[in-house]
Amino acid sequence: MSDEHGVLTEWSTGAERLLGYSSAEVVGHSATNLLSGRLPGEARQALRTRSSWSSEIELRHRNGSSVTVELLAVPTTGDDGTQRWSLVAAPGVKRCRREAEVLTEWAFEQSVFSTAIYDADGRLLRISDAGARVIGVREDEVRGLRLTEFLPGPPYTEVEELIFTALRAGEPGKKQIFVRAPGESRPHAWTVFVWPLKGASGPVQGVWVCSLDITNEYQARERLALLDRAGARIGTTLNVEHTARELAEVTVPEFADVACIDLLESVLRSEEPADGLLPGDVTLRRVACETGLEGAAPSVVTPGQVQACADASPSRRCLASGAPVLVRPGDADFDGWVAQLPPSVAQGIDSLMAVPLHARGHPLGVAVFARRGRPDPFAEDDLLLAGELVARAAVCVDNARRYTHERATAVALQRSLLPHRMPSHAAVEAASRYLPADSRVGVGGDWFDVIPLSGARVALVVGDVVGHGIHASASMAGLRTAVRTLADVDLSPDELLTQLDDLVISRSADAELDKGGDVSSEIGATCLYTVYDPISRRCSLARAGHLQPAVVSPDGSVDFLDVPTGPPLGLGGLPFETTELELPEGSLLVLFTDGLIESYDRDIDLGLNRLRHVLAGSTESLETICDNVLDNMLIERPVDDVALLIARTRALSADRVAVWELPADPAAVGKVRKQAAAQLVAWGLEEAVFVIELVVSELVTNAIRYGYAPIVLRLIHDQALICEVSDASTTSPHLRRARTFDEGGRGLFLVAQLSQRWGTRHTTTGKTIWAECALEGSPT
């Protein structure tokens, strides 16, 4: 600021920085003292006319040098009315240009970004020092070249395409690449920005390219992506060894060059793991080993190696501590860890980590990861990532172990309860198959049985308990035992299912009343019960919510029996109905559970039609027929248990059955005894005459004494000799021990001693007391 005479009255700090003079040195002196030359004519004219002016002039710096500035002079009036001049100086254009050039040079030299400028032909004009270091060249070595002329390769070709697109269309571009530049020791992730540079007239004159190193962000995304893939790929099955292989496969080669998974032997045996490791050796078995190293064939890393780990071994210490370990060449345990790797890949390993598998506080095994020949050996961040991967896999391994243990228990229980072999029976020839469900679903409650009945008859039963696992198997065991008990009472099929239904309802009610009971303990089941009589060739059937059986006639035609559908067991309130039909000798009765015909992609009707087609014309052995049915009906592993029971009916010829209707007269006992003895002689069973005479005498005497007419004696020559006496009374006899002076009470006791088994069954017209006596040479 100066007065009207040009004497300086104020001096700013900016002016001091510009010319170097302090305020005390210039205030009160004429402003012309600062000029290095004369004022321009237009400036002098503006001063005379008191008008604003600006011009580029040279001022004298305190150090004697000249400073070119753009000076602006504006006339003003002070508060006291005096005339003044406001003088504003800024660096001149030339100086600004020089400073801009210097700063631009510094920006290219000192920038941390890789920056380059290309001309309108796509040739390099400038590159920052950081960019030159990345590509490993000097600027003068590449100036005037296109990008791909000094950096060949697909990633750089893509960037060059962006450069030419920006030159042609004037549109900016952006691309991410992952590449190892010539001047870098390892690959980096880069975000490349391409921006067109336009002149004042509008056309694109060049391109500015800036590359930002985003390796840290890229690696973080890759780690998250790896964890995401691991979550999707690990634990797809409930198989311990398969889960361990999935962990190895998901980490190679993206995370490691070698991955070995060793599990405790107790885990592979599905045993419950201990809370910690007891002193002494522990045994680890290698269940998975993967390598991504070139030249290492999968065959050289075959799992199965067993390792006994002493207390001082690295694996044992890692398991005991529960903490992951990172080791490099020169560390104490490095050689010990490398020695556990397959020899074909151990050479040259430069970093290694071991991560213990722990789940629910239990040690399960150790995962070992190694890298060889990579520019980036394992670091602490990798240790955290490996710990997360292994922790997820450990939970899946433990789930698989627990499932395998439960499933093995359920399978063992179920198989112990099912018939181990089909009993030999005169009424039918039988064959069966039981196939557990896919491991993802678990063992169910399907069962079948062949139960010998009195009078040479046989009961065929198949059932299915809702649910899977040990509970379903235990429920199946209870129902199977109940069916056998009720069958021994010789109930009709509908009566048996009614009693079984009451039992299921009772058990469900007990479970609900049980304090703390689980609703899963309720039982839901279906059942098909069939009785076949080889003498009459009649078959009686009733079903409780179960699928109808198939019958294959001797001519090969197939029909599904129209048996009235009763409610599933456990519902109550609805009746069951018995259906009777006569079967030709040699017919096939095919009983099965829904797992045979029903699946996610096939409904029941399609399954039944397919089964009809498979069974049509079956004349082979029953074992062959069973195999054919499973092979054709189950293309894949079933998702539900499958129980299949096939029986070929036989007929007992009339000459092996003798029947006498007796009067209610005690005198008839002696006569019928002789007739029975004569029939045995005719059958060639003379050795059984004495026993049968006693049994016939006792049973007929009891019927005459305590029963009602009609009284019928029937002898059946089967695998055993069967004696049956029927009468119209519903009163059942009871076995008791007679005292010394009792006149009666010894008949049934004698029958029980002489026969293989005996019993009573009720009929629609009364009851039948029967006794089976073993024949010489027949199974007892």
Image (cartoon, rainbow, N blue to C red):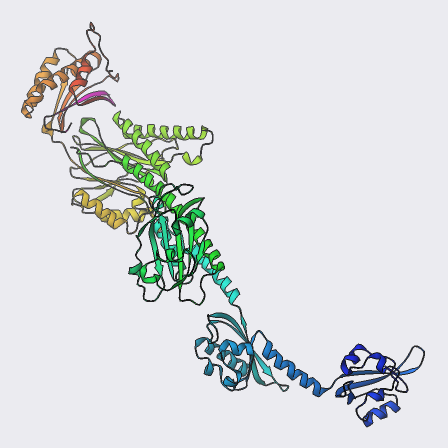
Q: Is residue 774 magenta?
A: yes
Residue 732, x across and y down, in percent = 25, 17
Q: Is residue 132 highlighted in magenta?
A: no
Coordinates of residue 503 in the picture (x, y in percent): 36, 28
Between residues 250 and 283, which one lies in front from this camera angle?
A: 283
Q: Quadrant of the C terminus?
A: top left
User: In the displayed structure, does residue 317 sit left or right of residue 296?
Assistant: right
- Is the residue 482 above or below the residue 616 in the image? above
Residue name at image x 5 percent, y 24 percent: 682
Image: magenta residue range? 760-780
Residue farthest along the top direction in this orientation: 741
Q: Is residue 30 visible?
A: yes
Q: Residue at x 36, y 33 (%)?
A: 569
Identify whether 768 is placed above or below 174: above
Q: Quadrant of the N terminus?
A: bottom right
89, 749: nearer the viewer: 89
